Structure formats: C-alpha cells, structure tokens
C-alpha cells in the first residue's frame, strides 16, 4: 500500500525547488525538534523504522500541509502516546508523573558520544546472498510490505517492477519491513541497485542518468 510520502516521480506536484543547504535550521524550533526526537529515541521504546512509519501514517491531509519538522513532531507525538511514555494528561500540559524511563534519559554530557556511536543496522544473517555486482535484477511489481498489509517498506513506488543492475553489496542489514512492525530485525542482504532514468520514467530529461537505490534482497528477483 502506498502512502502520501511516496512522492518520487509523481506527476503534477510541480518542480523540485532545492533549498539553501548552507542553512542548517531555518527556524529555531527546528533544532529543538531534532533534539527532542533524538532524546526520545534514546529511551529505547521504538527503532528508526518504527519512527519512519509513524510519520508515514499521518493522515494525507496533515502530511501535505505539514512542514518537514512538523511531520517529525506529529509522528513523535503519536509514538510517545502509543508507547505510554506520555499519557493523555501529560500531553494536555499537566505536570509529568515520575517515569520508569527517567534513568534512561540522555544527559547533556553523553550526547556527543551517543551521536558518534550512531545506530548501525548491519547484522549477521543466515539468509544466503543471491546476487553479485553486475547482476541484472527486477524489483517486485508492487511496492508493498509483504509481511504487514499497508506496512512500511523501503521500495519506492516509482521503482516497483523495474529492471536494474547490482552495483554494490552492502552486507546484511536489518529489514525495515519487519523491524517497523515489531516483528524482529530479520536481517538479509542489502544491495545498491542502479536504474536507468529511461527505465523509471516515460519522459526523462536525461535518459541515461542513473538512480541508485539501496534495496533489500527480498525486494528483488533475478532478471532472466
């Protein structure tokens, strides 16, 4: 099932207007939104795939009208309530009750080391590698989660059912389609796959340009 966030290659939304990348945060609250999101993630109540799916689940109307960081805040608010980190009374601005998660709060002196450590998603896996660099593959026809109806997937709609070429093997990584729904990490091989623009779109401005996507093995079949 596609959702409003899956906009790549969609017609009728106008030109993409690049923003000034030298500006780190356009508004002061954007930096606070990033900080609150990271600090909440450290509590260990969800993973990055669950948080992405929370933003994808926003209503189409809200998704269309919210700015980038407004989407972050809306998804985070849903997660905080769903996981019980914040209850309805606290959400309505009442004084917070003592939380069993208080000991896990990220302290200022630990921020640098936590961010430097990051959240690596490479894991050992028993799933055998089926493809090698140079192999031609096709993505599955429908950009849908095969484990959960309407669930999260990292296969974009514009690349579904398309022919590409393996250009890199990344090793084995957590499968977002599983991890986003509390079904375990289910690590499997991950590849960088190159697609010609002429394969992806009917009228590309530069047909020989390539788009490279990182795709999990279960999204792919051999192109025979």
Image: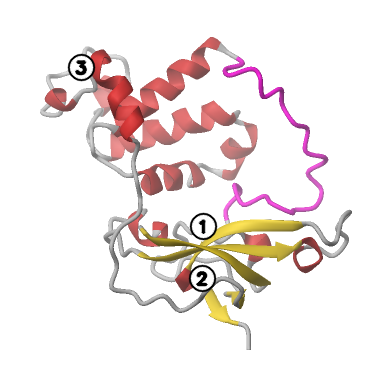
Picture residue at 12% right of the left edge, 24% below the top: 103
| Nearest to N terminus: mark 2 or mark 3 | 3
The single residue placed furthest to the bottom in the displayed view is 224
Q: Which mark is residue 96?
A: 3
Q: Residue at x 29, y 40 (%)?
A: 82
**Image vertical order of residue 143 relative to residue 59, above or below:** below
Q: Quadrant of the C terminus?
A: bottom right
Q: Earlier in the sequence, mark 2 or mark 1?
A: 1
Q: Crowding near pointer 1: few (<14 within 10 Å), some, many (20+)?
A: some
66 sits left or right of 127 in the view: right
Q: Nearer the viewer, mark 2 or mark 3?
A: 2
Residue 219 - label = 2
- Out of 212 and 89, give the one closest to the viewer: 212
Residue 42: quarter of image = top left
- Element assignment for label 2: helix
What residue sits right under mark 1 in the picture?
Answer: 154
In the rendered structure, are the residues bearing label 2 and label 1 in contact, judged by CB atoms less than 8 Å apart?
A: yes
**Residue 40 occupies which quadrant of the picture?**
top left
Q: Residue at x 70, y 64 (%)?
A: 195
The answer to whether 147 appears left or right of 134 in the picture is left
């Amino acid at each position: 099932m596609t959702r409003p966030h899956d906009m790549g290659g969609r017609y009728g939304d106008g030109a993409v207007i690049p923003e000034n990348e030298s500006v780190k945060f356009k508004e002061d609250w954007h930096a606070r939104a990033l900080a609150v999101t990271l600090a909440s993630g450290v509590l260990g109540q969800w993973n990055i795939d669950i948080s992405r799916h929370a933003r994808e689940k926003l209503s189409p109307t809200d998704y269309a009208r919210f700015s980038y960081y407004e989407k972050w805040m809306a998804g985070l608010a849903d997660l905080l309530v769903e996981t019980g980190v914040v209850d309805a009374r606290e959400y309505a601005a009442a004084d917070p009750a003592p939380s069993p998660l208080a000991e896990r709060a990220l302290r200022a002196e630990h921020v640098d080391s936590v961010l430097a450590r990051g959240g690596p998603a490479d894991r050992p896996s028993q799933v055998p590698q089926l493809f090698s660099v140079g192999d031609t593959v096709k993505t599955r026809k429908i950009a849908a989660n095969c484990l959960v109806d309407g669930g999260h997937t990292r296969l974009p709609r514009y690349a579904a059912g398309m022919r590409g070429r393996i250009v890199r093997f990344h090793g084995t990584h957590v499968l977002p389609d599983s991890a986003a729904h509390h079904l375990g990490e289910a690590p499997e091989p991950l590849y960088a796959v190159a697609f010609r623009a002429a394969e992806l779109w009917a009228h590309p401005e530069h047909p020989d340009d390539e788009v490279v996507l990182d795709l999990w093995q279960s999204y792919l079949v051999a192109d025979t």
